[in-house]
Amino acid sequence: MKTRIYPLFAGLVVLGLSTSLRAAEVQVAVAANFTAPMQKIAADFERDTGHKAQLAFGSTGKFYAQIRNGAPFEVFLAADDNTPAKLEQEGLAVSGSRFTYAIGQLALWSAKPGYVDDKGAVLKQGTFEHLAIANPKLAPYGAAAVETLNKLGLLSSIEGKFVQGENIAQAFQFVSTGNAELGFVALSQVFVDGTLKAGSAWIVPDSLHSPIRQDAVILARGTGNPAAQALMKYLKADKARAIIKAYGYN
């Protein structure tokens, strides 16, 4: 008995096979502040392109050390622009692939409603015992927090109250669990579509710290990977841009 394949069905089979053959996977190192938006972008990216992004989240400084030591990442979404540029100069990233995917915003946040005022005056009152920040040597948001306190003339008086996380995700966790009354976090961790998720917050003015320009780059291991190229293109498209903006990034 002969099996007939109807032309339309045969075309669909060929299309499905060619799509699956083209689909690829990319290993992505993502700065901790960008966790929530990147999880959403990665899900849409897989639906829209067939490519899959395997995500790892952590501090930019730690990822830099891991990449230099041969970690198998192919794309890096950093929390600054210096680290990707450095990797490019060292020959560990693809020259010309780097671009700014987001400009981050710093927020002073407490899980307690009404605890942080909209001008950050709570910092000057100094009635708190613990202030969470990310490690300023590893995390750009931690460095921005220290710079902010320095400009406010409060660093020396508050420094002894620091509860330091390895990255901005840990700093957020310290505040959300009550181990610190308040802390400097990424705006994207506490705001969505312009609405505060919980607690109280002060959005730190950009004038108090250097711009948190977050650059993406294809790493040397990602050379020739179509999924790496596709992801970089996807991050620049309107759908991803809308998600990034919704989480408070410029």
Image: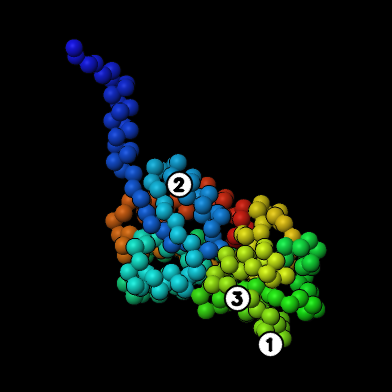
Seen at 37% across and 62% down, the residue is 73
Pick the front one: 94 or 110: 110
Pick the front one: 54 or 129: 129
Q: CA distance from mark 3 to mark 2?
A: 34 Å
Seen at 72% across and 62% down, the residue is 111
Q: Is residue 127 visible?
A: yes
On the image, the x and y values in percent for residue 250 come to 59, 61
Name the secondary structure under disc 3: strand
The residue that label 2 is drawn on is 45
Q: Residue furthest bottom?
A: 156
- Amino acid type of disc 1? Ser
Name the secondary structure under disc 2: helix
Residue 156 numbered mark, or none: 1
Name which quarter of the figure residue 109 lies in: bottom right
Give the answer, above or below, for where 191 lies relative to 86.
above
Seen at 72% across and 86% down, the residue is 157
- Amino acid type of disc 3? Gln
Residue count near mark 2 (Cα–Cα under 10 Å), binned few <14, some 14–19, many ≥20: many
Q: Are marks 2 and 1 in contact (CB under 8 Å)?
A: no
Residue count near mark 3 (Cα–Cα under 10 Å), binned few <14, some 14–19, many ≥20: some
Pick the front one: 84 or 198: 198
On the image, the x and y values in percent for residue 37 come to 55, 54
The residue that label 3 is drawn on is 164
